[in-house]
Image (spheres, rainbow, N blue to C red):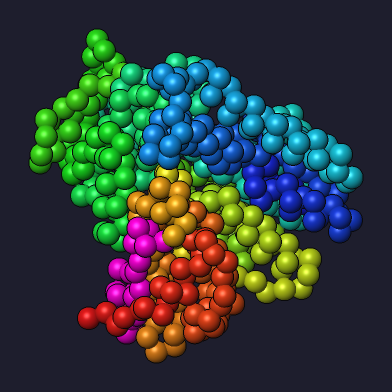
């Protein structure tokens, strides 16, 4: 048995920087990774998929003629080359991270499956490790739904779709949320026929209805077929690929796709950690239960990133690391509840979100102010010829503090950070109203939207 001061299980977004802080503090640390360092983001998430989004945007832009630039002939997409580029971007990022870790003093990087033997002992292959501090950063994976016929047909997940070397003829995406919609638009822009199937009444159901409808309009304007209220989804073999039963209220009750992508959610990678041997509690979805400091019910064990159910993003995983490191090493008392929720949907144009939705704010019962502006009235969007979407900000009418915002439009994923910063600082929206932003940008309209806010009935 080898003794360490700390063991980090999982080299995703929180594990490596935490190992860096711990070793810098003089601790002897073991970092255990069973597959690839970098976790979901680097290998099968943000890094390769945003590389695909960039290629898809280039193809889309090349096809436009309204800007006065005409590409002779039909725009061709070299799909194998596109996929190879995305994999190279991911591999380069992973190699840089692994090189940094291997050069880190006081760190032992181990490859293998870690399993608890008791609350402070882990087994990795033939070796046993023990430490008074153990940090779980094991991430998550695509959820495979228990739908009729799913075990009888070939299907793709967000991981396996990245291994394709041939463009699908007709990609059927089951799941009308963030991952599914990004892949849907990317493959449509590459030239595939695409249908999105969603069990619920609308796409991205956690967003406000106006946002959901605008997202649908954007996708349908590019030729993506959307089938919502698919109440009886099932699958069967078909000579041309996969038959998908829908039983929708409108449209044909079934369709046939050459490829099927399942994008209906995620599940934590906690099944094979032996958590029961350590007495570590989980919820019904397999998430490790943690308190506001990310500590589990077992003293000396913490859970960070996707596996704790407190955030499913790279930036929330990184913030988990910041919270744990600050509390352990800096004498701080930071808590997860202090975090302002923020995220983006990377279709084009993107959706940047901060804080509450309008529906959530209304449900709180407080008096509200809401400001809204279509992207058709944003100079930067008009000049780029990208006027789909709108900006919306919701504020508390009494405290004048911003509660949430949605910026669906060109640059929305960047412009929303101005809102996040103000919310994090806890200052009144009156302070932002009189800022002098740069013209022409998307962000310059934020003070204008605030000045035009009106009470909601």
Residue displayed at 79% across by 66% down: 329
Residue 12 coordinates in the image, percent (x, y): 64, 43
Return the residue nearer the eye: 319 or 453: 453
Residue 194 coordinates in the image, percent (x, y): 30, 29
Observer able to see residue 46 = yes
Return the residue nearer the eye: 438 or 358: 438
Against 197, is 156 above or below? above
Q: Quadrant of residue 108?
A: top right
Residue displayed at 60% across by 34% down: 43
Against 206, is 58 above or below? above
User: Looking at the image, which residue sits at the far front?
Assistant: 68
Total residue callouts = 0
Range covered by the magenta-colored residues:
355-378
Observer able to see residue 301 = no
Return the residue nearer the eye: 292 or 12: 12
For the C terminus, give its image quadrant. bottom left
Asked if residue 69 lies left or right of residue 224, the reply is right
User: Looking at the image, which residue sits at the far bottom?
Assistant: 398
Asked if residue 219 lies left or right of residue 98, the reply is left
For the N terminus, give its image quadrant. top right
Residue 16 coordinates in the image, percent (x, y): 73, 47
In the rendered image, residue 362 lying in the magenta stretch gets the answer yes
């Amino acid at each position: 048995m080898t003794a360490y001061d700390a063991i980090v299980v999982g080299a995703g977004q929180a594990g490596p920087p935490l190992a860096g802080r711990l070793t810098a503090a003089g601790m002897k640390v073991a970092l255990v990774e069973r597959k690839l360092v970098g976790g979901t983001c680097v290998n099968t998430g943000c890094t390769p998929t945003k590389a695909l989004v960039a290629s898809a945007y280039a193809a889309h832009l090349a096809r436009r003629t309204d800007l006065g630039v005409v590409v002779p002939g039909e725009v061709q997409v070299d799909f194998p080359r596109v996929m190879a580029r995305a994999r190279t971007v991911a591999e380069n990022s992973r190699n840089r991270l692994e090189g940094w870790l291997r050069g880190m003093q006081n760190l032992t990087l181990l490859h293998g499956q870690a399993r608890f033997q008791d609350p402070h002992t882990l087994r990795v292959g033939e070796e046993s490790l023990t430490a008074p501090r153990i940090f779980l950063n094991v991430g998550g994976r695509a959820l495979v739904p228990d739908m009729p016929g799913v075990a009888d047909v070939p299907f793709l997940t967000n991981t396996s779709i990245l291994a394709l070397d041939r463009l699908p003829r007709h990609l059927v995406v089951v799941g009308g949320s963030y991952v599914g919609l990004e892949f849907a638009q990317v493959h449509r822009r590459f030239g595939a026929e695409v249908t999105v199937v969603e069990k619920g009444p609308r796409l991205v159901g956690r967003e406000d209805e106006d946002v959901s409808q605008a997202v649908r309009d954007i996708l349908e304007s590019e030729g993506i077929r959307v089938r919502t209220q698919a109440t009886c989804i099932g699958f069967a073999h078909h000579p041309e690929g996969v038959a998908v039963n829908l039983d929708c209220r409108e449209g044909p009750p079934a369709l046939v796709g050459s490829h099927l992508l399942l994008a209906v959610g995620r599940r934590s990678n906690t099944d094979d950690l032996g958590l029961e041997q350590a007495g570590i509690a989980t919820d019904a979805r397999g998430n490790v239960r943690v308190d506001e400091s990310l500590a589990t019910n077992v003293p000396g064990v913490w859970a960070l990133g996707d596996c704790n159910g407190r955030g499913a993003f790279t930036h929330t995983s990184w913030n988990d690391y910041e919270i744990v490191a600050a509390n352990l090493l800096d004498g701080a008392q930071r808590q997860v509840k202090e975090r302002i929720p923020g995220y983006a949907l990377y279709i084009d144009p993107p959706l940047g979100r901060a804080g509450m939705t309008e529906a959530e704010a209304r449900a709180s019962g407080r008096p509200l102010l809401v400001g809204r502006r279509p992207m058709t009235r944003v100079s930067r969007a008009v000049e780029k010829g990208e006027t789909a979407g709108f900006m919306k900000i919701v504020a508390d009418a009494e405290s004048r503090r911003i509660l949430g915002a949605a910026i669906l439009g060109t640059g929305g994923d960047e412009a929303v950070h101005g809102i996040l910063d103000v919310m994090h600082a806890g200052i009144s929206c009156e302070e932002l109203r009189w800022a002098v932003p740069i013209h022409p940008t998307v962000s310059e309209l934020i003070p204008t939207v605030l000045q035009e806010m009106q009470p909601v009935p």
